Image (cartoon, rainbow, N blue to C red):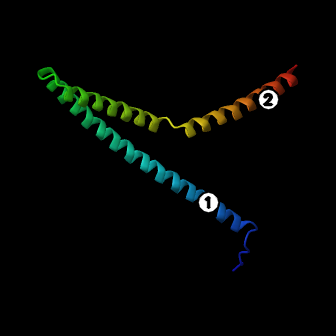
Amino acid sequence: MPSQSPRPGADSDDTDFEQSFQEVEQSLLLLKERYIQIQADQQQQQVLQQRLGDTQRQMRRDRSQSLKAELKQIQQQLEGLEVALESQLFSWSGLKEVFWQAVRFGGLGVILGWLLKSLAG
């Protein structure tokens, strides 16, 4: 049986793999947390919309100041939830990554274009 000699840098590859695996695992946990938060926010939004409809119906029958205040509070909570839900879908870090990829590959495209133009003529 031939003995297998350890590859040079095998420990480094294992460490890199472990680190990459931990990063993926951490990203997955963050994604799960965001998903749970989005579900909770959507459920709360539905409850508030139902409460808003009920309060508006009561408001048509009885125009009291307490109903107006409750209506305003519900609308503010709904607006806050909408902002939270939209911000969950639009993350600055994701946009930042796309931006730098566009800069990187766009710049590479420009350089290749200049190179091809200078070679062609």
Q: Crowding near pointer 2: few (<14 within 10 Å), some, many (20+)?
A: few
Q: Nearer the viewer, mark 2 or mark 1?
A: 1
What's the residue type where badge 2 is placed?
A: Ile
Q: Is residue 56 above or below residue 19?
A: above
Front-most of 72 and 24?
72
Left or right for 94, reference 69: right
The quarter of the displayed image where residue 43 is located: top left
Query: Which quarter of the rendering shows the N terminus?
Result: bottom right
Q: Amino acid at mark 1?
A: Gln
> Residue 58 appears at what percent x and percent y?
14, 26
The residue where tag 2 is placed is: 111
Q: CA distance from mark 2 to mark 1?
A: 34 Å
What residue sits right under mark 1 in the picture? 19
Q: Name the residue at the front extreme.
A: 65
Q: Position of residue 64 (x, y in %)?
A: 17, 25
Q: Residue 71 at what x, y percent from top left? A: 25, 28
Secondary structure of the residue carrying tag 1 is helix
Give the residue at x 60% y 57%.
20
Would you place residue 24 above or below residue 13 in this image? above
Residue farthest toward the left in the current orientation of the protein: 61
Q: Give the image quarter of residue 109.
A: top right
Dot 2 or dot 1, earlier in sequence: 1
Q: Nearer the viewer, residue 52 or 31?
A: 52
